[in-house]
């Protein structure tokens, strides 16, 4: 088994602002409505950018959402360019070779056999399904995406969304036309209540009773486990300890041990750089953040939800 560890210092996130922002976002979405064309409107009448209801009832279990398709301009010959199709996305992933799959892949017009061609190798089809919307208890969503022949499924569950206490996610992927070597899965959990308890205590070299953030990944050839544990620093910042453990499975265990013997230093360096880069991005994001409260915060979040990209 290989165990890599690294500790970084990051700027602290204000708990009060975070929970107020989360509650405000949930309230804005809870007060939204869907029009007949699928666009989702906030209470003030502005449309949520890039989002539309594809199927089902808005904010009800089973509702399916996707991105608003961009307007397509016909070419000089009056034809719609390939890659502009949107049909099929409404019902999530379509099977290759079906009409829905061909349209979602962006093909226009029938093929030589009169059918609609299947998606190309870089086609992306996806939709988000709302599994539960109970703002006082939990919110659950599931996303399915097919890209480059790889089918991905992501599930996310947030407990007590108005004042988040825990976040759970699971990810699985496979290539339908390949064997078990092209299958993988993973699970992650963030106990936010335990995180706040860990950073609110007095500075101490002793870690929290258990890591508030954990993640596991499994493949036929290897297993991995990641933990993230915060420590309060004397100056008010957070010390974050990241530990990655990787264990080979089956024939990879002896082969991996030999390979790691010769490549351990580059592997450790790559791990440290990845953790340092993540910490730098976190610090940059917080430095650019101007915490607002009350109506000012509500207006800022509403503007962000309805802001459209230029061009």
Image: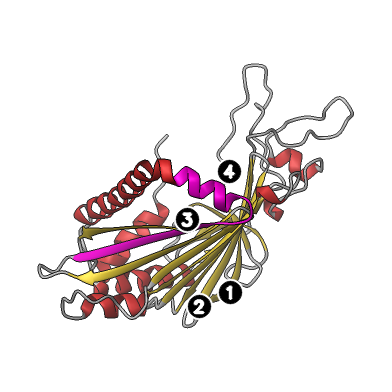
Badge 3 crowding class, 10 Å Cα cut-off, few under 14, some 14 to 19, many 20 or more, is many
Q: Which residues are magenta?
A: 238-260
Q: Earlier in the sequence, mark 4 or mark 3?
A: 3
Query: Quadrant of residue 17 in the image?
Result: bottom left
Eye-nearest disc, 2 or 4: 2
**Percent position of residue 202, x then y:** 16, 80
**Percent position of residue 271, x then y:** 36, 49
Quarter of the image that includes the C terminus: top left
Q: Earlier in the sequence, mark 3 or mark 1?
A: 3
Q: Earlier in the sequence, mark 2 or mark 1?
A: 1
Q: From this viewpoint, is residue 308 visible?
A: yes
Residue position marked by numbered label 3 in the rendering = 47
Contact? badges 2 and 1 (CB < 8 Å): yes
Query: Quadrant of residue 234 in the image?
Result: bottom left
**Percent position of residue 120, x then y:** 69, 33
Name the secondary structure under disc 2.
strand
Contact? badges 2 and 4 (CB < 8 Å): no
| Color theme of the render | secondary structure
Residue position marked by numbered label 4 in the rendering = 69
Numbered mark located on residue 138 in the image: 2
**Percent position of residue 274, x then y:** 34, 48
Residue position marked by numbered label 1 in the rendering = 132
Q: Earlier in the sequence, mark 2 or mark 4?
A: 4
Q: Is residue 6 left or right of residue 233?
A: right
Measure the C-alpha gap from mark 4 to mark 3: 14 Å
Q: Residue furthest top?
A: 76
Measure the C-alpha gap from mark 3 to mark 1: 22 Å
């Amino acid at each position: 088994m290989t165990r890599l560890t690294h500790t970084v210092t990051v700027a602290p996130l204000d708990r009060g602002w975070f929970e107020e922002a989360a509650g405000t976002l949930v309230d804005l979405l809870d007060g939204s409505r869907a029009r007949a064309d699928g666009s989702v409107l906030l209470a003030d009448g502005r449309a949520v950018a890039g989002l539309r209801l594809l199927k089902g009832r808005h904010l009800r279990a089973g509702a399916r959402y996707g991105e608003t398709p961009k307007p397509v301009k016909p070419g000089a010959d009056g034809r719609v360019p390939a890659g502009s199709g949107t049909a099929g996305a409404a019902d999530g992933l379509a099977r290759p070779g079906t009409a829905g799959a061909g349209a979602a892949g962006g093909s226009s017009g029938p093929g030589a056999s009169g059918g609609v061609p299947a998606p190309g190798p870089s086609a992306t089809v996806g939709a988000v399904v709302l599994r539960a919307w109970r703002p006082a208890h939990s919110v659950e969503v599931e996303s399915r995406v097919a890209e480059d022949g790889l089918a991905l499924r992501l599930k996310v569950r947030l407990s007590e969304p108005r004042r988040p206490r825990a976040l759970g996610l699971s990810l699985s992927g496979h290539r339908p036309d390949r064997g078990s070597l092209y299958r993988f899965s993973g699970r992650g959990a963030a106990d936010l209540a335990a995180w706040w308890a860990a950073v609110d205590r007095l500075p101490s070299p002793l870690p929290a009773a258990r890591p508030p953030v954990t993640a596991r990944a499994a493949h036929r050839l290897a297993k991995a486990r990641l933990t993230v544990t915060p420590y309060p620093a004397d100056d008010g910042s957070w010390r974050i300890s990241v530990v990655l453990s990787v264990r080979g499975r089956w024939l990879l265990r002896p082969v991996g041990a030999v390979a790691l013997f010769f490549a351990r230093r580059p592997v450790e360096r790559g791990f440290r750089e990845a953790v340092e880069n993540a910490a730098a991005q976190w610090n940059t994001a917080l430095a650019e953040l101007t915490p607002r409260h009350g109506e000012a915060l509500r207006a800022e979040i509403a503007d962000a939800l309805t802001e459209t990209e230029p061009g």
